[in-house]
Amino acid sequence: MAHLHWERVAIAQGMQSGHGIQRTAYTLFLLTTLFWGGNAVAGKLAVGHVSPMLLNAARWGLALAVLGLIGWPRLAADWPKVRSGALYLILLGATGFTIFNVALYSAVVYTSAINVSIEQAGIPMFIFIANFLFFRQRATLAQVAGFLVSIAGVALTASHGELARLLTLDVNFGDLLMLGGVIAYAGYTVALRFKPEIHWQSFMIALTTGAFLAALPFAAAEAWVGSTSLPDARGWSVIFYTAIFPSILAQIFYVRGVELIGANRAGLFVNLVPVFGTLLSVALLGEKFRIYHAVALALVLGGIALAELGGRKAAAGKPGR
């Protein structure tokens, strides 16, 4: 009887621990997606006040300076591991940080911040596909169903409420650019599984270095064609916001959340970006909220709920989860 009692206690403690991990992950992803929703709005606010490639380079340069001041001792301690994985870390930062934001800041020149926000809900689809193709990691039936529901919302947004436009590939150039960014960030998320065992400060410094280095050629090309616009007061405000919140805090929270519940489940929370992005776009930019936006958001949120329920059940059925 005593054995059974302690077994029940161990099970209850494990369940509490699992719930605590989920609550922590949910909080991290809530803040992450809030900051990322603000990133789309910041990109739109920057138009005419700082050119997109200069914004991207300045953002990562400032983030690198802040992280370097904070984490230099940690980087020195982790240097052997950082040096051995330098190419991987540089490419990871270039893909997930720079390429994604180059696409986002360029996309908002041609399409709305609401559209750019909602289209990021396509990230989970590419995470599922990559995990299956490269690692044979299967999604649950509920996750697939949730993904399909969410992607319907993305398609509705990309087509501006007219799905027939997709059949003729009549999609705004900005929406197409954002699709490229979505694919890049999904690849980054999947590749996080190979992250070396180093302190988060060292990891972020390495990734931000890759992001800054990758951003410089884009800024140089922008200057070469004469499109550079130096920041004014609003431009500097956007640079500081994007450097601290979407660049540093959100990326740290996202990496930790992926560690806690895995890439497939983590990717689904990216679908919260449209919610915050849409609300902030309406409140701060005065963009029009149309019926198809409401339908798309309902589909996206419904997809998250369905897929996360399936993901939690699957995780609960695995040892050690």
Image (cartoon, grey):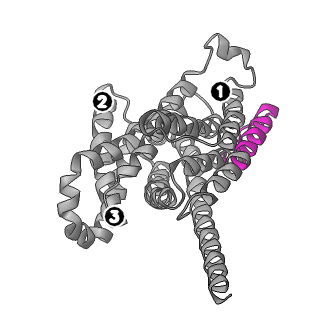
Q: Quadrant of residue 302?
A: top right
Report the span colored magenta: 280-305
Tag 1 secondary structure: helix
User: Are the residues tagged 3 and 2 within 8 Å (C-beta)?
Assistant: no
User: Is 298 contained in the magenta span?
Assistant: yes
> Label 1 crowding class (10 Å Cα cut-off): few <14, some 14-19, many 20+?
many
Residue located beneath label 2 in the image: 221
Determine which of the numbered discs, if any, sits on residue 158 in the image. Answer: 1
**For residue 274, side relative to residue 213 (left or right):** right
Q: Residue at x 78, y 31 (%)?
A: 292
Question: Does residue 50 sit above or below 103 in this rendering?
Answer: below
Q: CA distance from mark 2 to mark 1?
A: 28 Å
Q: Nearer the viewer, residue 3 or 170?
A: 3
Q: Of the two numbered discs 3 and 2 on the same chain, state the one appearing first in sequence.
A: 3
Q: CA distance from mark 3 to mark 2?
A: 27 Å
Determine which of the numbered discs, if any, sits on residue 179 in the image. Answer: none
Q: Of the two numbered discs 1 and 3 on the same chain, state the one appearing first in sequence.
A: 3
Q: Residue at x 33, y 52 (%)?
A: 207
Q: Of the two numbered discs 2 and 1 on the same chain, state the one appearing first in sequence.
A: 1
**For residue 169, side relative to residue 301 (left or right):** left
